[in-house]
Image (tube, rainbow, N blue to C red):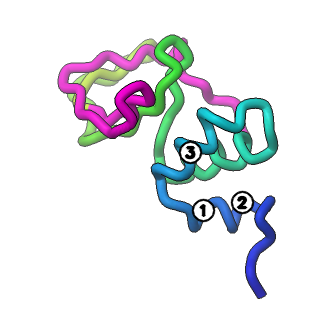
Amino acid sequence: MPARMDSLDFFMRLSTETLFFIFYYQEGTRAQYLAAKALKRQSWRFHTKYMMWFQRHEEPKTITDEFEQGTYIYFDFEKWGQRKKEGFTFEYRYLEDREL
C-alpha cells in the first residue's frame, strides 16, 4: 500500500531537490513542515540568519560550545543548486534546532 502523501514516509522518498522546492515554495504548509523534517533526517541543518540549509561535507575542523567550523555543502536557493563552502563558521545560535 503506498504511503499517504501527507506522511513523513512519503516525503522521505522524495529527492533532496524536491524537498528544497517544497520547503521554499510551500511556505506555512504541512508540506513545508514535512519537507523540513525529511531534510533534517538527511543531516541537513537550517541556518536562520542565511535562511539556507547546510550539511557537513566532512567532520568540522573546530567545534566549540558556540560554533563549529569546517567545510559544508549548502543549498543556494537563489541559484538553485548545492554549493561547497570551505572554512565556514556555523554559529549554533543560528541553528534552527526545534524538534520537528
Q: Which residue is mark 3?
A: 40
Judge from the rendering whether residue 66 lies leftward or rightward of residue 1; answer left or right: left
First in residue order: circle 2 vs circle 3: 2
| Amino acid type shown at disc 3 | Lys
- Cβ atoms at labels 2 and 1 below 8 Å apart: yes
Q: Main secondary structure of the magenta part?
A: strand
The location of residue 55, given as percent across then percent down, is 38, 39
21 relative to 90, above or below: below
Highlighted range, magenta: 72-100
Q: Which residue is mark 2?
A: 8
Q: How many marks?
A: 3
Judge from the rendering whether residue 79 lies leftward or rightward of residue 97; answer left or right: left
Judge from the rendering whether residue 20 lies leftward or rightward of residue 35; answer left or right: left
Mark carried by residue 12? 1
80 relative to 39, above or below: above
Q: Give the crowd class for mark 1: few <14, some 14-19, many >=20 residues within 10 Å.
A: some
| Amino acid type shown at disc 1 | Met
Q: Give the crowd class for mark 3: few <14, some 14-19, many >=20 residues within 10 Å.
A: some
Query: At numbered mark 1, what does the secondary structure look like: helix, strand or loop?
Result: helix
Q: Magenta segment: does it hold 40?
A: no
